[in-house]
Image: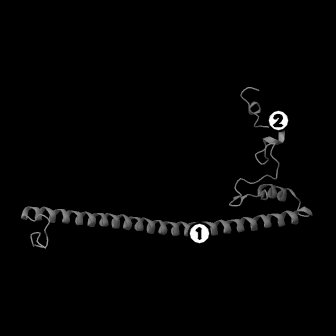
Amino acid sequence: ATGTGLASGCLSAHPRSASPHRPPHHAPASTLSESSVHAKGPQPSPDVGRLLEQYALTRTTSAKRPALFAELQNAARLAQEDRGDAEMRAREAEEALATATAELRELRKEATDRRCAQWLNGASGMSTVLAARTAAAVARKAGVTGDLDGDDGAA
């Protein structure tokens, strides 16, 4: 079994498993469809290919044919509902994203405004300190030593 698919364990030795229309022996005919993963998690869905194959194989007068046709109609209806639900969830997600983006912009603007206000407060505080230091330096140069009322210490 060198170089064959049998050695890998992926292929069955059963002759029907070689058919491209049948799943491997270890996968039942009614498995979850890979394309039917919903937001709520995977849910069983009819195997439409299997239904079509059974429908084609039945005779026109077969009693199974109407039941298979009803199953196909139900599968189509469920697929349409799923598509509608997915489109609605996509619209809701887009709206939520737009809202979140607008809120983020507003938060960034508020943060920028807050930083600017803090900087301005710091700058005005610095300008007050610088103005006081400048006034003290001018006063020292003018010879004022602390007697700001002008009476030379006489009370």
In this rendered view, identify the residue nearer to me: 18 or 39. Answer: 39
Contact (CB < 8 A) between labels 1 and 2?
Answer: no
Residue at screen point 56% across, 68% down: 96
- Image quarter hosting the N terminus: top right
Q: Amino acid at mark 2?
A: Ala
Furthest residue in direction front, as rendered: 155
Question: Which element carries disc 2, helix, strand or loop?
Answer: loop
Instruction: Establish if 75 lies above or below 28.
Output: below
Q: Amino acid at mark 1?
A: Arg
x%, y% of residue 36?
71, 58
Residue beneath label 2, please? 13
In this rendered view, identify the residue nearer to me: 55 or 110. Answer: 110
103 left or right, relative to 2 = left
Residue at screen point 26% across, 67% down: 124
Q: Looking at the rendering, which quadrant does residue 48 occupy? A: bottom right
Q: Looking at the rendering, which quadrant does residue 75 occupy? A: bottom right
Dot 2, crowdedness within 10 Å: few (<14), some or many (≥20)? few
Q: Looking at the rendering, which quadrant does residue 46 occupy? A: bottom right
Residue beneath label 1, please? 91
x%, y% of residue 104?
47, 65
- Image quarter hosting the C terminus: bottom left
Instruction: Tell me the tag on residue 114.
Output: none
Label whose residue precedes the other's in the sequence (1 or 2) = 2
